[in-house]
Image: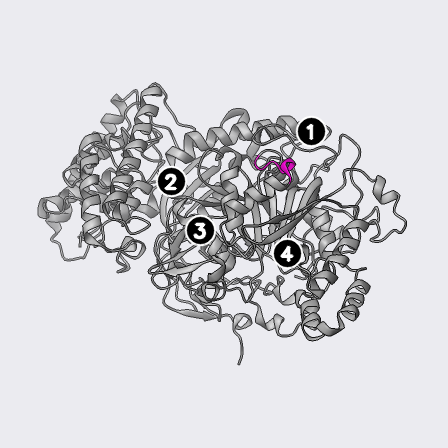
Amino acid sequence: MVMGKYSRVDGRKPSIYCCTITVVVFVALCLVGAWMLMSSSVPVQNSNPLSQGNVNGVKQVAGENISKQFEDSPGDLLEDARKEDSNAVDSQSDSQSDVHDDQNVTEKESESTVEDNQDENRDEKTESKNVIEENQDEKTVTEEEPKTRTENNKDGKTEDRESNSGDGESTAEAGETQAQGKEANKSDQTEPEGSSGENKSKSDDGEKNPDSGENANENNQEGATGNNVDSQENDQTSIEILPAGTQSELLNETNTQNVAWSTQVVESQNEKIPQQSSISKDQHGHGWKLCNVTAGPAYVPCLDNWYVIRRLPSTKHYEHRERHCPQEAPTCLVPIPEGYRRSVKWPKSREKIWFYNVPNTKLAEVKGHQNWVKVTGEYLTFPGGGTQFKHGALHYIDFIQDSHPDIAWGKRSRVILDVGCGVASFGGYLLEKDVIAMSFAPKDEHEAQVQFALERGIPAMLAVMGTKRLPFPSSVFDLVHCARCRVPWHIEGNVHVYYTLARYFRVFACFVQRDILSLLAGGKLLLELNRVLRPGGYFIWSATPVYRNRPEDVGIWKAMSKLTKSMCWDLVVIKRDTLNGVGAAIYRKPTSNDCYNNRPQNEPPLCKGSDDPNAAWNVLLEACMHEVPVDVSVRGSRWPEQWPKRLEKPPYWLNSQVGVYGKAAPEDFAADYKHWKNVVSRSYLNGTGINWTSVRNIMDMRAVYGGFAAALKDLKVWVMNIVPIDFADTLPIIYERGLVGMYHDWCESFNTYPRTCNLVAVIAEVDRILRPEGKLIVRDNVEIIGEIESLAKSLKWEIRMIYSKDKEGLLCVHKTMWRPTEFETITSAVIQS
């Protein structure tokens, strides 16, 4: 084991040794002082203001004399502003250390100690890097040590993550190591984090040589990109990691004083009563334990609160599938599934995922004949089928388009809602049509269906149509789809109510039919779809009542027909898919209030004027409809621009508002988009050491206008845009742009599987939903950045980059496979026998 810089300070060295050290340090400092006086071209680089407690420190930008180690690195970033994986050969370590000595003035003393150590231990060629590694708490950003499979840290933890995430076949690793060596010899540079990480493990689908070459090609392309940036910007003296000038104003929101913007807190409180809502410590002062819960690695705190669920007075409206958050957000860590591996890359992940990442077989056993999911060796495979499209989702998607061409996938219809999505194959294949589907399903007996979807890289979330509104604004979805989604649209009760009655009283079909029709006054669930569906949008219903003539199906069809007619929905077409033997009914929501005003009966009634259609956080469902906006300056009165124009053009209804940042809303919108395009292209893509080809699922925890997601449009990623309930309600703008998102309260746990407003609880929640080897990028003031850095280190996360300027900070960290060994029992999440 290579010893750190304090390995010699053991109290057993003679005094003459200490004197020698003192002399060497003194001479070194004198040389440094002389060098500083003579130097006129390179500004001094400050040590880390965050780690040392100086929150007002400002990082200085190096000019032409950037360390040779990063001379050809992508993004042309500073040595003190980035931290990367390194696969350089050992012979480069000493030369890199010498260059580092010339530039990092504040580290001279520690570097001198390294030189002394080298006199007695010449074989430890990478010692300088380990000195830097153990001094991370005292530096702003350091170069990351080479990640080998045998390196141990101070806590005795083996840095062997890649052996867990890869297949572990040595032949593939050897081939990839050779490719890395060639790449290092060609470019004399350290590779970006993602490339290094990818090359050290076996490929996603277990193939040895093909993926090894594939990764090498990716690395060559990334290196070429970095070289192009260097050649184009060799006169540039700084890289924009944090915005400067007028763009920095975007960091200072004025939404709390801006009365033009409401929040979900205000909207929902005005609308309904809101939901009432001994540890061993490491050297960083934070203690962590594993969550001891019944759900294990699939623990979702607000959906697995069995203490509350077991005490619900009723479950007939799916109350037991709704959110019931514990009074205190958990601060324990969710365990990682045994045998977890790095996720298969998109688009291969759409067809197969590692079995041990989501080790559930029940759905394969129950739905395998419908081509939902199958167990195939080490993988779970997804043939692309579903209950209504056994022969594949693509055929079914084309069938819908042919049934009504005005749907125009990817142009007119861009953002859709898929209810009861199963494993989300419908949404997964719609991505080929430039359509993004917000797919949702409950955490129910269809074990891990949403978790399958997320592991595949398909947008999905856990939710249920029960007693409360969905966490979306009104009039935002271009189309809503339900394929045997098991939701009783025609009544307000549980989905099983009608089918149970029909099964046991089939001989009394007429009685059952009358009983169902008498419940028509409910229909709250379909009315909730009416709320979130854009005026002029379509509802596609593919279910047995559309194309079968069994008594129970006939009864449901009649009830559904009566309800949709009273809602003024136009039945556009009923079409039969002969290949799959199913049918679909396509309805269209009205674009005016004429039909509402001319109904013989006001049933369902129009909502009161005081009922805010955008209030969506813990608001109970109401059996009423909101009027369609007719003022041309109001959102919902016109259809958005076709994709992709709608992404970049400010919505027409922003003209009369003041933006979140205090400017006119259209100007605010444009400035935000320009800001994020600049930050993403010049900092995130090239400056964080992230291999973006390995990134698929992204969450923006405070999305504002969705500028970050818009700037990532050309990457093969999707972004869940979160608008916190106590921030300006900008989620309608995000949907208008053709992006997806939802409201959330970060003092509570998010409705998703693992892989809250105490900051510790929030970081624990981030750890729960972030995949092992996933990345967290935080932009905030330096005080918050410092706290998060400390928490990240206590979690054994790797600090990949930290940067500060003008009291604003940027932090990029890498989640590792580390888990604590002690457990903490969450009694509310344990099913008592």
Q: Is residue 324 above or below residue 596?
A: below
Residue type at mark 1: give it: Tyr
- Indicate which label's residue lies in the foreground, 4 or 3: 4
Q: Residue at x 43, y 28 (%)?
A: 240
Q: Residue at x 34, y 18 (%)?
A: 235
Label at residue 95: none
Residue type at mark 4: give it: Ala
Which span of residues is magenta-colored?
404-410
Tag 1 residue: 652
In this view of the protein, which residue sits in the foreground, 484 or 207? 484
> Taking 244 as reference, is 321 left or right?
right
Residue type at mark 3: give it: Arg
Q: Tell me the element at label 2.
A: helix
Q: Tell me the element at label 3.
A: helix
Tag 4 residue: 543
Whole-angstrom CA distance, mark 1 to mark 4, is 37 Å
How many other residues sit within 10 Å of disc 2, few (<14), some (14-19) or many (≥20)?
some
Instruction: State yes or no: discs 1 and 3 in contact (Cβ < 8 Å).
Output: no
Where residue 232 sits in the image (x, y, percent)?
A: 35, 20
